[in-house]
Image (cartoon, rainbow, N blue to C red):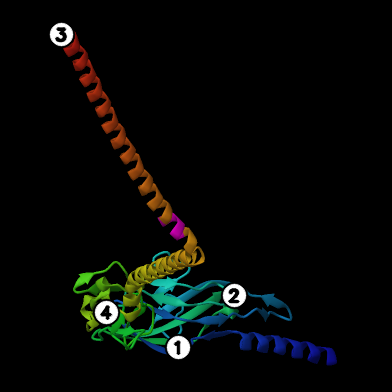
Amino acid sequence: MAVWDKNLLWSFMFLLAGAVGQTVIYPLTSTCAVRGSTVTLPCTFTPRKSFNDGWREVPLKIVRVRWCKNHEICHGSVPSVFDSNSANSDPRYQYLGDMKTNCTLQIRDVQQGDSATFRFRMEADHPEGHFTNTTGVTVRVDDLTKMRIISSSDDKKLSRGETITLLCASVCTFHQLEVTWFKDGHALSETGSSLHLSPLTAENSGNYTCALKKNMKTVSEPYSLQVEAGAGNNSCTLIPGVVFVVLLAVIALILFIIKRKLRAAGGETELKHPGNVYSNIQKQEDQQETSRAVEDVSYASFHFTQKKQESRHVGEGAVIYSTVAS
């Protein structure tokens, strides 16, 4: 009897452990989505590991997972938005989970018909392992909400070289959005919910808007961005001019100092050797006197030669006269 009670107790504990461990948790029991956006329904589950079958513990294995819309049990032939055993699921519904613990569902291009309550169901290789959490996640689709732009800077007038990030968001949803960005009415290539501009230039000035990629009616109010020439950039443009002026001033100062040193060196030479200067002047005067003496000698020689020739002529004439007279 004691042995039977012990076995019964262990069986009850196994059953209790299995029931307690079998859960499905929805972090969000309700959420809002803008038509045309993408919404993610996070989900985790804990499957039952085993069950007791006539005093024997039988292990369980998850073989099927499903997501249904507006059905409390999601079993049997109830239509599913996703079924791991079916290849005909709507491609807008992407199962991001697995067969172990993750049961997250993502709905792309949300439509008005997605306003419903979605529930997850896991099915094992034995009915004892089937389970559905009837709480579910309620999705509300908002078709009138417009997008809005949130800036990383409170100042709409920024300087060149700075950085700014614009976020396209909706009051209705916080999920990642696929959007189209516009600048002055022209579409940009970026499709993410955030637009990063760095470094800013004058070309970034303009009016920015965003809208859901698949629902252009959700266009946001324009965000005006003005990029001005910052003080830091002006100082950078003045640096070459300042350097040039300073360089000229340094060169002028060096030349001035060299000139002063040369003048000082010349003055000291004249003061230390005044006799040399006087002797140079005296030598110049002596040279001038010598030149004059040479000129006088030449002149005297010239006159002397002339007189000698005249005497010769006179002598020759006297001889001829004498001969004739005879």
Where, by quadrant of the figure, is residue 304 drawn?
top left
Which label lies toward us, 1 or 2?
Answer: 1
Mark 3 surroundings: few (<14), some (14-19) or many (≥20) residues within 10 A: few
Give me the C-alpha separation between circle 3 and circle 4: 129 Å
Residue range corresponding to the magenta coloring: 277-281
Horizontal arrangement in the rendering, residue 1 relative to residue 173 (left or right):
right
Which label lies toward us, 4 or 1?
Answer: 4
| Amino acid type of the residue that numbered disc 1 sits on in the rendered structure | Leu
Are the residues tagged 2 and 3 within 8 Å (C-beta)?
A: no
Circle 4 residue: 228
Horizontal arrangement in the rendering, residue 23 relative to residue 57 (left or right):
left
Give me the C-alpha separation between circle 4 and circle 1: 45 Å
213 and 206: which one is in front? 206
Which label lies toward us, 1 or 3?
Answer: 3
Residue 279, magenta (yes or no): yes
Give me the C-alpha separation between circle 2 and circle 3: 186 Å
Query: Residue 64: image x %, image y %?
Result: 52, 72
| Amino acid type of the residue that numbered disc 2 sits on in the rendered structure | His
Where, by quadrant of the figure, is residue 277 drawn?
bottom left
Residue 28, which numbered label?
A: 1
Give me the C-alpha separation between circle 1 and circle 2: 29 Å
Residue 324, which numbered label?
A: 3
Mark 2 surroundings: few (<14), some (14-19) or many (≥20) residues within 10 A: some
